[in-house]
Image (cartoon, helix red, strand yellow):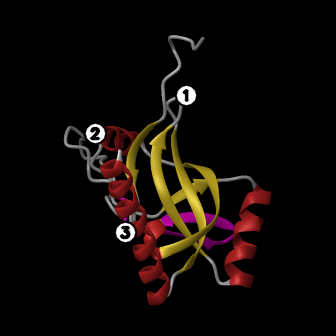
């Protein structure tokens, strides 16, 4: 039985187009270095990671172009909405991700921004390869067929 203090995972932002635009190879969970007003703003649920990506600089992985709006009750120490944010990973994980990006032409795409059971902000990061137009069409055909198949099965009883 679960403790009273355990909280379920609460997804605050999701990149829904990522699975359509990219072929996901591997996923990894990373922490994010945030300021206090950023955490409060994320808890309000207004953040977006749809057009963001991760990049490596000086042996560290950074989240680029993620929008966390300013906290309304924040004072003059409020944060900048689109600043680069450092992702917290182990050295071995960073080397693995940087190797995949450099050698294989992969991209680091954020899938979800959420709070884990302990209340910490986490980012689900995917190592992905961009899909071509014909791959996207094939994905759309499969999705439409599975939807139609479900309708037909329900109609038959």
- Please determine whether, in this image, residue 128 is positioned above or below residue 28: below
User: Which residue occupies 66% across, 71% down?
Assistant: 58
**Neighbour class for label 1 at 10 Å: few (<14), some, many (≥20)?**
few
| Quadrant location of the C terminus in the rendered image | top left
Residue 66 in view, yes or no: yes
* Residue 97, horizontal then vertical, whole percent: 70, 67
Task: Write down the quadrant of residue 142 in the picture.
Answer: bottom left
Report the span colored magenta. 48-63
Residue 118 image label: 1
**In the image, is residue 94 part of the stretch drawn in magenta?**
no
Give the CA separation, mark 1 to mark 2.
18 Å
* Residue 148, horizontal then vertical, whole percent: 35, 63
Q: Which residue is mark 3?
A: 144
- Please determine whether, in this image, residue 146 is positioned above or below residue 128: above
| Quadrant location of the N terminus in the rendered image | top right
Residue 44 image label: 2
Residue 52 in view, yes or no: no
User: Sequence-wise, which precedes: disc 3 or disc 1?
Assistant: 1
**Neighbour class for label 3 at 10 Å: few (<14), some, many (≥20)?**
few
Asked whether, in this view, residue 89 is left or right of residue 34, the answer is: right
Q: Secondary structure at mark 3?
A: helix
* Residue 41, horizontal then vertical, whole percent: 31, 43
Give the CA separation, mark 3 to mark 1.
39 Å
User: Sequence-wise, which precedes: disc 3 or disc 2?
Assistant: 2
In this view, the mark in front (3 or 1) = 3
User: Sequence-wise, which precedes: disc 1 or disc 2?
Assistant: 2
Q: Secondary structure at mark 2?
A: helix
């Amino acid at each position: 039985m679960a403790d009273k203090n355990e909280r379920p995972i609460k997804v605050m932002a999701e990149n829904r187009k990522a699975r359509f635009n990219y072929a996901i190879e591997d996923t990894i969970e990373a922490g994010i270095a945030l300021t206090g007003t950023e955490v409060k703003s994320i808890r309000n649920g207004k953040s977006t990671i749809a057009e963001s990506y991760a990049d490596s600089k000086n042996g560290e992985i950074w989240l680029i172009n993620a929008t966390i709006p300013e906290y309304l009750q924040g004072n003059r120490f409020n944060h900048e909405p689109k600043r680069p944010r450092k992702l917290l990973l182990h050295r071995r994980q960073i080397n693995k991700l940087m190797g995949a990006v450099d050698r294989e032409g992969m991209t680091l795409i954020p899938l979800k921004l959420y709070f884990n059971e302990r209340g910490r902000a986490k980012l689900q990061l995917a190592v992905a390869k961009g899909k071509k137009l014909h791959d996207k069409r094939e994905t759309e055909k499969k999705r439409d067929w599975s939807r139609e198949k479900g309708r037909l099965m329900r109609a038959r009883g």
